[in-house]
Amino acid sequence: MQSRKNFDKNSLFRILLFIVALGVITYFYPDKADRDYKYSIGKPWSYPLLTAPFDMPILLDSASMAEKKDSIDRTFIPYFKIEEKAQKTVCDYVRGYYKISKFTGELKRVEDHLRHLYAVGIVENEVYAKIKSGELPKIKVLNNNQARLVDTKGMYSVKTAYAYLDSVMQGSASVRNLNLSSFMAPNMLYDQVNSSKYLEDMYRASLASPGIIQRGERIVDRGEIVTPQIALMLHSYQTLKKQHADSHVKVKAHYPIAGFALIIGTLLLFLYLFLSMHRTTIFYNNRKLTFVVALVTIFSISASTLFSTIHSSIYFIPISLVTILLTTFFDSRTAFFVSVVQVLICSLMVNFNLEFIFLHLVACVIAIDTLQELSKRSQLIRTAMFILLGYSVVYVAINIMMEGNLNSVNPRTFMYFGVNAIMLSFAYVLIFVLEKMFGFVSKVTLVELSDVNNPLLRELSEKCPGTFQHSLQLSNLVSEAAHEIGANTQLARAGALYHDIGKMENPAFFTENQMDVNPHEVLTPEQSAKIVVRHVADGLKRAEKAKLPMVIRDFISQHHGKNLAQYFYTTACNNNGGEPVDPEPYRYPGPNPQTKETAILMMADATEAASRSLKEYSEETIIALVDKIVDGQIAKGLLKEAPLSFRDVEKVKGVFISRLKTMYHARIAYPELIKKDK
């Protein structure tokens, strides 16, 4: 029942993991309605066929609108209104002044001149300045909603009108005493309301739509030259797609997102099925599965953000980085399948779908083919260079195929490919970070751990020289056997080197480190077994302190499985008169081997140790020994949890026999020189 609950819980976690990934990727989907197309007049249209999603008027672009407005502004004649009160106010003031003065004879002349000035028109100082500069040769005067065109030549400002009056009155003292400059006011006033109204009418008439694009009508197709008229239609399409507020269109705008979610869901379902059927070690390991799904999700989000902000990012986004990481941590087949899913997801976010898919799939295949085992930084640089070359060749080929010439090849694109290659070169750092985050072990780390100058191995060689030599021999033995059955050679080698590090706590209690004294002679079998069995727990403590990866610790805990310390158990039984004793004090803690690599180590460890007790190293004795040891482990059920087939076991036996024959081959006896008798 508890197992069923765990199964249901883990299954629910895996399903929710993929559902969350679908939701997050869909949420960050870049809405193509808000995407700007990049095009130039006189150049071919590089995107797929574009049609109008609804009836839309053709709008002028900002440059055309600005040009037309500038033209209207230059030719527009402003509207003015006549302020009748201005003349009446001045004339009433003049009459009142002359009634109480002695210069009544000049009244009629002054009034005549004032009527002349106001008949010609007196304007404000700003308007007069424009008239004098030639900017305002005519104005329109509204009278009873009828506009008449008036020539501004000869019009006055308040200052020039007073100067004119003073001149024609020949400096009359009465005119000076009138102080008309304080009472004269313009009668031609700028009409802001009507000027703005008629200007806007002219704008609307000039900027009116030159036509309508009907729903479903073709705007432009791939390869078609973008003319000014097509550019106008494209501008209208992009503007209205962003600004259209009709609720029916808003509902339809969700259709592409729903379609995108459906496609992404299908791709993630394919990934789910692939992992569940062909990569169960990843699928049923929540940590590994989370890493794969998170990698696809985070990369999709990053791609969506880049594509929405930087148009050229389709060339320098390092999708093959996903391939490199998965090849490093898992295998090439997993890397290829996940990379295909990743490329297809990202291709839905760009306009150059076909070009994008070809470019990045080729890069991913190159990454897999050139990076079988990452053990040196130089391999990454080599892979990045091959990917750069692959990008460049495919890009040129696509342009030749689409255009029939090299004119459309943009040299800057090769620079983007270079940026892509540079980012791939830094995958080494990212691999290190992900190892620490998810507890993975890359081939690079395994190579570093296999270095015999590692502090832990150097300590082993100093404290337990016999155990160290035993570990070295095992590392060669298990790596060859692992290679024979397709297991992880580097992992098997590293695990063999560290499997007995617990013996450093009590080196003298293990045969390979003893000289002439055997401390077990003064101990009971149970005490001896306790010390020997404890080297597993001691090894795990040292491994934890040294922060060895978990896959290496598995070799320490599983290389004896749940087997018995057979020598001491048999001795105890013999001491008990041949009757069995409780086996538990003599049993290793286990677990039994869970992987091919740990199973090989268990077989090799027991075989190599037993081979040292053979009295004769012939082919027959070695074969008999290997069969006895391995078949005995199988009979005890120690290997039933390891994913080994009978064929794998036979291949491993063959390697052991071949290697042991080489290790213990009989040397040729050198003949003695026969001396002649003198």
Image (cartoon, grey):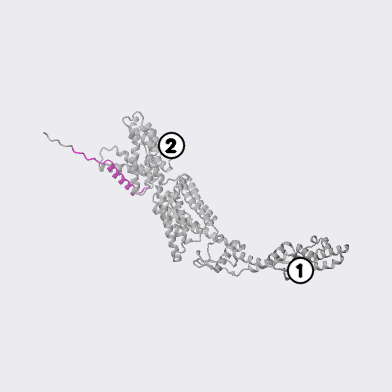
Name the residue tied to disc 2. Answer: 541
The answer to the question of whether label 2 and label 1 lie on touching residues, with beta carbons closer than 8 A, is: no
Residue 343 lies within the magenta run:
no
The residue depicted at 71 percent of the width and 63 percent of the height is 129
Residue stretch in magenta: 644-671
Q: How many marks?
A: 2
Bin the neighbour count of mark 1 within 10 Å (Cα to Cα): few under 14, some 14-19, many 20 and up. Answer: some
Mark 2: amino acid = Lys
Question: Which is more toward the observer, 550 or 417?
Answer: 417
Can residue 583 be seen by looking at this rendering?
no
Can residue 513 be seen by looking at this rendering?
yes
Secondary structure found at label 1: helix
Q: Residue 193's spot in the image, x, y percent?
A: 72, 64
In this picture, is 572 found above or below 306?
A: above
Q: How far apart are the alpha carbons under marks 2 and 1?
A: 110 Å
Number of the label disc, if any, that sits on residue 120: 1
